[in-house]
Image: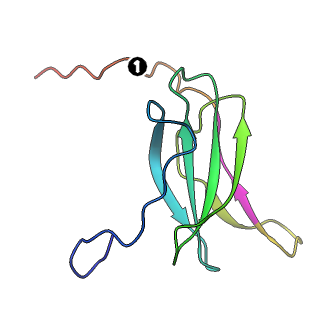
Amino acid sequence: LSLKDGSVIWYTAPVHGPDGATLGGVACSPDGKVFNGFATADWKSGGLSAFDVQTGQRLWTKWVTAPVHNAPAIGRIHTHDREAVIFAMGNPTGGPLGPAVWTN
């Protein structure tokens, strides 16, 4: 979304289908990539996708055997020359998997 007026700059259809979910936000890297974790509708798998921040083009998707619930951490690890993207997988312990129920 545009910070100036809130208009949509780009939109990319999710790889997980219409009944999946993206959870926990996104992370941006200094080299112009946006990373977003997702879960499938059955909460049995998910993954992480990378997008170009300017165009919204999907650069890659990594599927894994559990949902990805949070934005990844991005940075350099020890002596590696390349940027690393680290993400957690699995359902949160004790977290509800159905509709949220709120009480006052």
Task: Mark 1: give few (<14), some (14-19) or many (20+) Cα within 10 Å.
Answer: few
User: Is 75 covered by the magenta stretch?
Assistant: no
Left-right relation of 63 to 3: right
Left-right relation of 90 to 54: right
- Dot 1 amino acid type: Pro
Q: Camera-side residue: 76 or 98?
A: 98
Give x and y (percent) for residue 19. Answer: 44, 30
**Colouring chosen for the image of the structure:** rainbow
Q: For the magenta stretch, what is the residue range?
A: 84-89
Q: Camera-side residue: 104 or 96?
A: 96
Residue visible at 65% across and 64% down in the picture: 74
Left-right relation of 47 to 102: right
Compared with residue 97, is residue 55 higher up or lower down, i.e. above or below? Answer: below
Q: Quadrant of the C terminus?
A: top left
Residue at the extreme left of the image, as rendered = 104
Compared with residue 87, is residue 6 higher up or lower down, i.e. above or below? Answer: below
Give x and y (percent) for residue 96. Answer: 40, 19
Q: Quadrant of the N terminus?
A: bottom left
Give x and y (percent) for residue 44. Answer: 62, 22
Residue visible at 53% across and 62% down in the picture: 27
Residue with the mark numbered 1? 96
Residue visible at 62% across and 29% down in the picture: 90
Q: Secondary structure at mark 1?
A: loop
Q: Camera-side residue: 18 or 79?
A: 18
Residue visible at 51% across and 78% down in the picture: 54
